[in-house]
Image (tube, coloured by chain):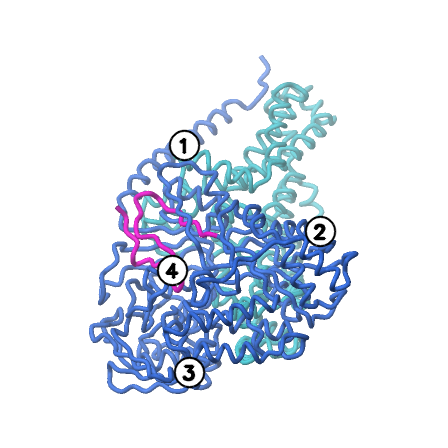
């Protein structure tokens, strides 16, 4: 008989493989049992964007979550996402001219090493934030002086009236650091801290905060592990360990929820959420403070026609806002009238954006473009807040074709797009998420104020109809307003910004909070994104 | 053989310098701004912050100055500090390379063994149902998009049939073993933690199978083609005429000769997968070098881009060297040529 194959060898190999596979599968059952036992660990699946774990240098959405879990600012934002409430400061007073702010620290507050939080720590941390010249240093632009009256009383003075300071001091970036510990590891708050402070690397494996958690370990692009701060002076969190696992992609995050590998998934988009029917997973859809907008730069070189106000208004009127919400996020979004998020000061009664193609055509004719024109639309080819910007661009292409505006879509990587819009480019799609609760950051970024980002790009003070003075005055007035006057002051500013037709908000997408059904306390915060200390496993 | 190895080792530093120079120049002239990943997009409009960041990260120096500094530091084993992770690139690579190597070695083992078996079956049962079935399986491995396949197996074996764990290298709720080698299988064994070893092995199964299947397709087709070619040659007829059994003809005479082209493919595939396993790493949240490379390129993280390129380049050079050595071992004519 002819031996047609080395069968004995093959059989041996197959037997070995089967035995190994069986051992591993049996191991699977054992290990899943072990995993369930560790029920004081919360696993969060998230595509992380961490640029630093140093409170003065960190600036990202994941940084907000980390900093608010491990550190504490003087103030924080209540769950209603409107009210400023005590954090390290138990009470505070504001002078009538809104330039002097006195904070009284809670004497019970301690850092995770047990040392008390003092006024010196507050002064050092805020001065360092300013002098390190990191991404969030702009929050301290108005700072004039910080005086430590006694270990538990700090007086902050601003250069000009600043009603926004309370909101700013609730931002996680204004976290108070254990100054002695950080100073011993290369940190300083000197004027030249931008180059002399070398603590960035130390903060990657250590923390020096007073929050409910402390840093356990961090491996970039892998996992961020936080352990419960056993010396926490407030109510201790339920979770002993929180693991934030780097997970790219909504589908993978949803699968991790389904398999129980993760307890919470943070970037599951509405479409993916709708496609999953698992009784063990809860999807909560809530309004967010993020938004996507169209923006014009009338002074940009390369525009085939002058981007006059009539033309900008015609384009704004041709956009099908409702259709954009349906098309990009399956209806899970809101209109946003101005470049200030719904729910922030000044937005209570703003008119919704309007679609009126007939009027848009009239304006096109008035502007001399009845026969149409061609315009480049530059955008980052990416998914933000669950919105595929390429899809949105295609939708806008269809909408504007109705008024004979032919869009040439120019996708770019995020990095290239960010660089391009500062040149600037004539017409683009942008997006924005808040750094803290307060409307001044939007006036600063989007207002037609000289030397401010979009003021520069649009040519405030140079372009026709954008004098750069009116909004600066309104901005200063809003900053000097009392709490009772703020809504009206920011509303006036928002109406002026709507009238500019430079920033055209398209939609504010809803946020999907996805978690296993046994997980409670998951909520979205305008300052802190996901407050980890409130999460419980039932 | 020694001469081949020595010659390659002498040339290697010059090749690495060439790779560094080319990468450095290309990265500097790529459109975009590395400051985006350092200070964030919003702060780019603030000249004071931009100036401070440029000074801190040496981006205020001219490109030739930066190149000279980089090469000097490289000579001392310093690959710079990543703009994104704020860690030395060498630390980043040391953390990620073992993860990728562990995955790629397992995937290569899966791919090489199954590819070899399928290739042999195909050749032995040429144009019969077994051949068609083996070729179909191999073809699927080459054709199915890895991204889709990864999501599918995760859904099937981790969600629907919870036999195997989801993404990651270890159960996220378990304590991490002390990092000694970075290879999770080795570290868990050295720690004497059998449960963690099993867990790490289970986490490897799906990504290694998905990545390995793509290798299966390449290897089996190569083995089949060369085996069919070898089986037609005179020395095979001679071996059969001398009364050698079919299995002896296949394994000792035909397969040994047919393996030589497969070795070349395996060498290059291994080197390619070190930086090319990014899709599997992304789906399975595997903290390896492929995803690090993609993130670095997206962020224009110059030190990281150059560091990864050096590692990738070295990988190719070493794989090439090992392939030559394997060639020499498999083919006596090569040994003779080298002597």
Residue name at image x 62 percent, y 36 percent: B142
> Residues at badges 4 and 1 in contact (C-beta under 8 Å)?
no
Residue holding disc 3:
A161
* Pick the front one: A84 or B319: A84
Residue name at image x 46 percent, y 85 percent: A192
* Image location of residue A40, percent across then percent down: 27, 50
Residue holding disc 4:
A525
How far separated are the C-alphas under marks 1 and 3?
62 Å
Q: The numbered mark 4 sits on a residue in which chain?
A: A
Badge 1 crowding class, 10 Å Cα cut-off, few under 14, some 14 to 19, many 20 or more, is few
Number of numbered markers: 4
* Pick the front one: B279 or B116: B279
First of labels 3, 2 by sequence position: 3
* Pick the front one: A496 or B166: A496
First of labels 4, 3 by sequence position: 3
The tint chain A carries is blue
Magenta stretch: residue B262 in it? no
Residue B48 left/right relative to B223: left
Residue holding disc 1:
B161
Residue A126, located in which quarter of the rendered image? bottom left
Magenta stretch: residue A532 in it? yes
């Amino acid at each position: 008989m002819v031996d047609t194959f080395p069968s004995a060898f093959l059989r041996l190999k197959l037997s070995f493989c089967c035995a190994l596979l069986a051992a591993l599968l049996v191991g699977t059952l054992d290990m899943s049992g072990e995993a369930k036992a560790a029920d004081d660990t919360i696993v969060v699946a998230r595509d992380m964007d961490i640029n630093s774990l140093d409170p003065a240098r960190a600036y990202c959405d994941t940084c907000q979550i980390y900093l608010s879990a491990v550190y504490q600012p003087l103030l924080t934002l209540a769950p209603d996402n409107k009210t400023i409430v005590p954090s390290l400061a138990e009470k505070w007073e504001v002078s009538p001219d809104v330039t002097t702010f006195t904070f009284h620290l809670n004497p019970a507050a301690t850092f995770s090493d047990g040392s008390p939080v003092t006024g010196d720590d507050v002064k050092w941390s805020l001065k360092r934030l300013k002098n390190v010249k990191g991404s969030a240093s702009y929050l301290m632009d108005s700072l004039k002086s910080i005086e430590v009256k006694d270990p538990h009383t700090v007086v902050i003075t601003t250069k000009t009236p600043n009603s926004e300071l309370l909101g700013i001091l609730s931002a996680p970036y204004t976290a108070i650091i254990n100054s002695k510990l950080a100073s011993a590891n290369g940190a300083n708050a000197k004027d030249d801290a931008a180059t002399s402070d070398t603590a960035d690397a130390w903060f990657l494996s250590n923390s020096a905060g007073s929050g409910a958690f402390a840093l356990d370990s961090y491996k970039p692009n892998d996992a961020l592990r936080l352990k419960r701060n056993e010396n926490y002076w407030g109510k201790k969190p339920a979770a002993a360990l929180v693991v934030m696992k780097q997970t790219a992609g909504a589908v993978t995050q949803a699968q991790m929820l389904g398999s129980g590998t993760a307890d919470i998934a943070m970037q599951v988009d509405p479409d993916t959420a709708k496609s999953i029917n698992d009784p063990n997973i809860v999807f909560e859809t809530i309004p967010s403070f993020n938004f996507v907008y169209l923006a014009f730069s009338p002074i940009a070189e390369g525009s085939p026609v002058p981007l006059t106000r009539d033309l900008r208004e015609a384009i704004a009127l041709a956009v099908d806002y409702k259709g954009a919400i349906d098309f990009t996020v399956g209806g899970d979004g809101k209109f946003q009238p101005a470049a200030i998020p719904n729910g922030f000061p000044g937005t209570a009664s703003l008119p919704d954006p309007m679609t009126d193609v007939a009027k848009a055509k009239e304006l096109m004719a008035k502007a001399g473009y009845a026969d149409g024109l061609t315009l480049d639309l530059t955008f980052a080819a990416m998914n933000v807040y669950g919105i595929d910007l390429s899809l949105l661009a295609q939708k806008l292409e269809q909408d504007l074709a109705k008024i004979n505006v032919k869009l040439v879509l120019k996708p770019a990587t995020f990095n290239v797009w960010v660089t391009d819009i500062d040149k600037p480019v004539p017409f683009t799609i942008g997006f924005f998420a808040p750094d803290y609760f307060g409307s001044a950051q939007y006036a600063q970024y989007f207002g037609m104020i000289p030397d401010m980002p979009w003021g520069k790009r649009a040519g405030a003070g140079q372009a026709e109809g954008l004098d750069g003075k009116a909004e600066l005055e309104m901005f200063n007035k809003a900053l000097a307003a009392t709490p009772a006057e703020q809504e009206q002051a920011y509303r006036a500013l928002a109406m002026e910004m709507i009238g500019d037709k430079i920033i055209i908000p398209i939609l504010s997408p809803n946020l999907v909070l996805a978690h296993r059904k046994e997980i409670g306390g998951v909520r979205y915060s305008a300052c802190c994104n996901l407050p980890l200390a409130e999460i419980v496993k039932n | 053989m020694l001469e081949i190895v020595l010659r390659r080792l002498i040339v290697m530093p010059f090749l690495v310098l060439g790779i560094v120079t080319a990468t450095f120049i290309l990265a500097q002239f790529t459109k975009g701004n590395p400051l985006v990943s350092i200070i964030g997009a919003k702060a780019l409009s603030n000249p004071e912050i931009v100036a401070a960041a440029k000074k801190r990260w040496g981006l205020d120096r001219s490109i030739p100055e930066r190149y000279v500094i980089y090469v000097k530091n490289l000579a001392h084993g310093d690959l710079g500090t990543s703009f994104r992770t704020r860690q030395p690139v060498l630390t980043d690579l040391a953390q990620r390379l073992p993860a990728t190597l562990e995955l790629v070695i397992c995937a290569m083992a899966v791919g090489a063994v199954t590819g070899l078996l399928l290739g042999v079956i195909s050749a032995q049962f040429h144009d019969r149902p077994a051949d068609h079935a083996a070729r179909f399986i191999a073809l699927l491995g080459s054709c199915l998009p890895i991204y889709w396949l990864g999501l599918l197996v995760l859904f099937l074996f981790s969600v629907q049939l919870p036999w195997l764990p989801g993404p990651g290298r270890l159960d996220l709720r378990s304590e991490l073993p002390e990092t000694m080698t970075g290879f999770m299988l080795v570290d868990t064994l050295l720690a004497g933690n059998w449960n963690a070893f099993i867990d790490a092995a289970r986490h490897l199964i799906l990504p290694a199978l998905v990545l390995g299947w793509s290798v299966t397709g390449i290897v089996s087709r190569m083995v089949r083609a060369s085996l069919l070619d070898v089986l037609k040659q005179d020395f095979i007829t001679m071996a059969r005429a001398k009364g050698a059994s079919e299995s002896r003809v296949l394994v000792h005479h035909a397969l040994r000769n047919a393996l030589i082209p497969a070795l070349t493919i395996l060498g290059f595939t291994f080197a390619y997968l070190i930086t090319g396993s990014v899709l599997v790493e992304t789906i399975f949240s595997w903290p390896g070098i492929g995803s690090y490379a993609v993130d670095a390129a997206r962020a224009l993280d110059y030190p990281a881009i150059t560091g990864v390129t050096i590692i990738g380049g070295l990988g190719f050079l070493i794989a090439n060297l090992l392939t030559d050595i394997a060639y020499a071992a498999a083919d006596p004519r090569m040994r003779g040529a080298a002597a």
